[in-house]
Structure formats: structure tokens, C-alpha cells
Image (tube, grey):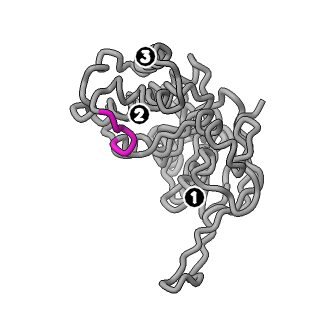
Amino acid sequence: MDIINVDDITYEYIRRDDDGNVDSIEMALNKIKFNVRKGEFLCILGANGSGKSTLAKHINAILYPSEGTVWVDGMDTKIDKNLLNIRQTAGMVFQNPDNQIIGTIVEEDVGFGPENIGIPTDEIWTRVEESLNTVGMLDYRKHSPNKLSGGQKQRVAIAGIMAMKPKCIVLDEPTAMLDPNGRKDVLRTLKELNKREGVTIILITHHMDEAIDAEHIIVMEKGNIVMNGKPKDIFSRPEEIKKYRLDLPQVTELAYELQQEGIDMPNGILTIDDFIEELSKVV
């Protein structure tokens, strides 16, 4: 069963001059259509300006399509009465956790969302403890967020969304500002949420290595979906990936470079173990 249905949506950014007249119209999304199954891990890739962040804001009803419809668990995002339920169903995590953390103590920040939707106090603290435990931050519940690392802050931001009990989490480049260790922590958390809790994950990124473990990948370019498939299928087309201003995962890139030197390596190698196995066949 699908939790997200994006049905032929178009979105235009309209710029106006000082007199309020239309100065320019930029097509940000052009007839985008795809579905996301409940419990799926979807990765959306694209270079800067491809439209992936604009698409993310449609799933959380921050933006509404100029044409077409976005359905979140059967709810039309354009209908005002659906707004609260949609944002409880599809939580949003942004690139900079500092824009999302408002509490002076970690546990207070995580409890802010449930408190604002009227959850009873006892239930709030239960959710806070469960959410912080899920993201591995329970030992920091009494800490100030300002003293946490970037990766820890991002995990607190994810815990704040988890406390709302969403069925789906949309993450818009959540590791863009993190060091390698912070990126690993956040990705590990997302994988565990997806596998252990059954939460649908929609990860938007331009880091190719983050897409390897996704179930499905969508590649965007200039507001269009230009590639759509499993990770192995997508990364088996290196020339096409590069055409859309994207890199390959590091191990995939290495295998591709060896191909260019005449070594018989298959396309779509995604892991070091697979690389070693294939290389051992030709050495």
C-alpha cells in the first residue's frame, strides 16, 4: 500500500516586480509522478537546482502544487483541514538542525511537538524517552543542544519528529553540514528507524554513497524525474549519472575507472565486498 502518491504535479516560482506585476516564471517541478510504499526507503538525488527540495516541501504541505495532486496517506495536501494530520503523518527534517531545535534542554525540545498537538503530559514523556532511545541520544536528555555535535543535533531533530509518531519522515539533505562521522551516525539512525520501526524514509541528498542502501532511487534534473529504479540499476548507468552532474559512489567510480583502463569489471558495483570479489576474478 502506498503512503505517498505524487500525481502529475507542477510547481512554478512566480517573481514579481516592485509594482506587483509578474516579472518571471520559473518551472521548478514539471509533471512529477511517483508513489512511495509504506515502509519503503526512497532516496531522491539531484544536483543543486534540480527541484528535489521543492518536491520535499510538497510532501509536507509546506508548498502546494500549481497543478496536480499530492496525497499523503490518502489526504490531499491542498485541503486545509488535512494540514495537521498530514504534518503528523509526514514529518520533515531540514538540512540545518539549528533551524529545528528550539529547546534549551534536549528532552524539552523533543517534547515540544507532542505538547503542541495536545498529547497528555505522561504520554509526552513516554514518547520523549522512546524517541531519544531510538536515535541513541537518551543519555543526553538533560544536555543543552548547543553543546552537542552536528550529528548529535541532527539525531535530536529526528527524535523530535519521531515523538510525533509519523508514518513517514522526509529528510532534506540532513547530512550536508556534517562531518563523515556525523553523516554515518545519522544514516545509521535512519536505517534502524526504517527496518526496526517500519517508518517510511524519503532521503533527499546529493551524496551518492548515502543512496546505496535505499530500496529505490529517483534522480531529478531541472524539475523532471530523469531516472527511476533500484540502486544497482541506477548506478549501472555511469555515463547517464554523470550527464546529470552527479558523481558515482566511490567504489562504483573506482570500478568504472578500471573499466576505462580495459579491465573487465561489471557495472553497478556498490560495495567494497562486491568490488573485491569481481576484481579477484580478473587479477
Badge 1 amino acid = Gly
- Depth check: give the residue in front, 29 or 99: 99
Tell me what residue is drawn at x 41 percent, y 33 percent. 157
Q: Position of residue 174 (x, y in %)?
A: 43, 41
Q: Position of residue 18 (x, y in %)?
A: 48, 84
> Magenta part of the protein: which range?
98-103
Left-right relation of 127 to 202: left
Q: Secondary structure at mark 3?
A: helix
Q: Which mark is residue 11?
A: none
Among numbered discs 3 and 1, the one appearing first in the sequence: 1
Q: Which mark is residue 51?
A: 1
Badge 2 amino acid = Ala
Mark 2 or 1: in front is 2
Tell me what residue is drawn at x 39 percent, y 41 percent. 100
State the CA–CA distance, disc 2 to disc 3.
Answer: 16 Å
> Residue 150 sits in which quadrant?
top left
Tags 2 and 3 in contact by the CB under 8 Å rule?
no
Tell me what residue is drawn at x 57 percent, y 56 percent. 54
Dot 3: within a 10 Å radius of its alpha carbon, few (fewer than 14), some, or many (20 or more) residues?
A: some
Among numbered discs 2 and 1, the one appearing first in the sequence: 1
